Image: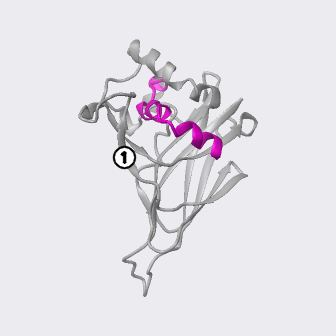
Amino acid sequence: MQYVLGLAILCKKYKKNPIVRLFIDNQFIDEFIVNNTTKLFNGPLWPGIPPEDEQLQLSFANKYKMFELDEKILKDGSKIVLEVQNTDSNWMNGFITKSTLIAIHNIFLIPKSLLKRYQLIFKAFYKHRRIYKEGKRMKNGWAGWPLAASGFGDYHGGDTTIEYTIQKKCGIYIFDVPEENEHEFLCLSRLINGLCSFDNFDKYLHEN
């Protein structure tokens, strides 16, 4: 089975672009430069929803880095590791007033076959009330499968390492679910449903 790992990384650039190295456990996957061209915009949960319906608008990134992973390199307890190389600042005599900062806007892991059918799955769960009502978030700020429950949102400066733990549930690999959310791990992400409706989403999948 093939999986898709998707990353949306925001960057506030000072002078230089940071570099990110991606590992699954100790296996090197890729190295790439993060520029400051990824921006956020509001978009609809479903195609055709008018912008004035604010409850059904979400914050999306306009660019994603996507990787197709073979299931053979994943296991229960695996770590997805992002090593960020970022020493860009105006450090002088122990003081820093300007530096390049990056933030993980969101990260997801999902079987490729399910990603292609995500909107159909989302509609079925929504119809049977298996996800939360619009605007309600789960504990710890988790926004539902297949997103990670932590390790996103905050800006980081300097060299840093960000880790995500993988677990196996119902026969598929997912990001580690907080203990208090374990009975809700099949609650689905509105954000991924919205992404699947964009015309360029499939293009990103095949370009990376």
**Which range of residues does the magenta coloring cover?**
184-208
Horizontal arrangement in the rendering, residue 127 relative to residue 171 (left or right): left
User: Residue 40: x, y in percent?
Assistant: 39, 49
Which amino acid type is shown beneath numbered disc 1?
A: Phe
Left or right: 59 in relation to 70: left
Q: Nearer the viewer, residue 48 or 30?
A: 48
Q: Is residue 173 above or below residue 183?
A: below
Q: Quadrant of residue 56?
A: top left
Which is more toward the observer, 158 or 176? Answer: 158
For the N terminus, the quadrant is: top right
| Residue at which label 1 appears | 41
- Residue depicted at 42% across the width and 53% down the height: 39
Residue 58 coordinates in the image, percent (x, y): 35, 38
- What residue is shown at x 40% (from left), y 22% (from top)? 131
From this view, report whether residue 10 is shown above or below residue 145.
below
Mark yes or no: residue 76 visible: no
